[in-house]
Image: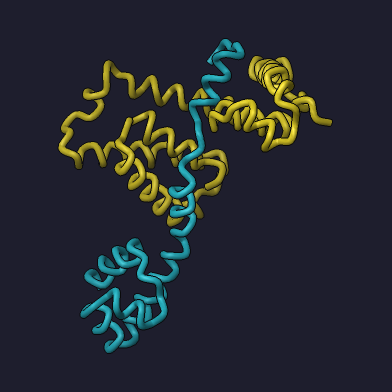
Amino acid sequence: MDRFSRYVFAICVQGFRLPEHDAEDVFQDVWARAYERLGQLRDDDAVRPWLAQLTRRACLDRLRAGSRVEPVAELEGGSEDEELARIEDAWFVRELLEGLSANCREILDRFFCRDQSYATIASEVGIPPGTIASRISRCLRTLREMAEGRNDAPAASGGRT
Amino acid sequence: MSTYDEEKLGELLAALPPAPEAWVRAAQDLPLLRAQADEIVARAEADAAFRERLVANLNAALEAEGYEPDVRLVEQLRGRLEDA
């Protein structure tokens, strides 16, 4: 669950733009069903697509239950598909992040995913605030190289050795 | 996705923020709640008097038995006791 909770959350909130209380209900429903059936999946690679399908169905059910006859059409110009594709891209990058050093992962996650300031990151991670920007830049560069297939191995340390 | 630049990578990282902690904690509790519900339903099936107490006043019966009447546990039990 630790690995996929943000993925399920993104589908609910960004992919289908569910209001917060609906998104929370769907989030809980998805995990309740997931716990019941996860053991039946033999292939680890099947987990994410299965969760994605489960979440999409649960979101559509919730939208229909809210009297929206054509939920997809209500989203502007097929943007639901675009958002779901963007979430898939985001997941791809998220997985690449695992190939970075722990320090890089933490700095990038705090800055981009948790929207923390340089000062907060510096304080929490215990590094000088003046070095945060350069560390982010260095970690992103390594991530880009990995994404472009130029570097498959764990690399940048984010400055901490 | 075919091209990557650092700005786009940053946007994609930001597209997967963590789920709210309370949501995650609640979801992590689900297996425990399920196990508690299984235990209570099994007891109710074996003990008619206990089942009667549950049906009469679910919250009170749970509290009397030392269970915290979590709203999700209560909802789950209501459905399962009606079905049983």
Residue B17 visible? yes
Residue at coordinates 31% horizontally, 67% vertically from top-left? B74
How has the structure been colored for display?
by chain
Q: Position of residue A95 (x, y in %)?
A: 61, 31
Residue at coordinates 44% horizontally, 39% vertically from top-left? A8
- Which is nearer the eye, B64 or A35? B64
Q: Position of residue A128 (x, y in %)?
A: 75, 27
- Which is nearer the eye, B68 or A143? B68
Q: Position of residue A39 (x, y in %)?
A: 51, 54
Q: Position of residue A124 (x, y in %)?
A: 67, 37
The reply, left or right, for residue A156 in relation to residue A136 is right
Q: Is residue A13 above or below residue A47?
A: above
Q: Is residue B37 above or below residue B24?
A: below
Answer with the quarter of the image where residue A45 lies: top right
Residue at coordinates 44% horizontally, 41% vertically from top-left? A51
Q: Is residue A2 above or below residue A125?
A: below
Q: Is residue A79 above or below residue B51?
A: above
The reply, left or right, for residue A130 in relation to residue A41 is right
- Which is nearer the eye, A2 or A51? A2
Residue A96 visible? no
The chain assigned the colour yellow in the figure is A
Residue at coordinates 27% horizontally, 75% vertically from top-left? B58
Of all residues shown, which one is farthest toward the right?
A161
Colour in which chain B is shown?
Answer: cyan
- Quadrant for the C terminus of chain B in the image: bottom left
The reply, left or right, for residue A57 in relation to residue A67 is right
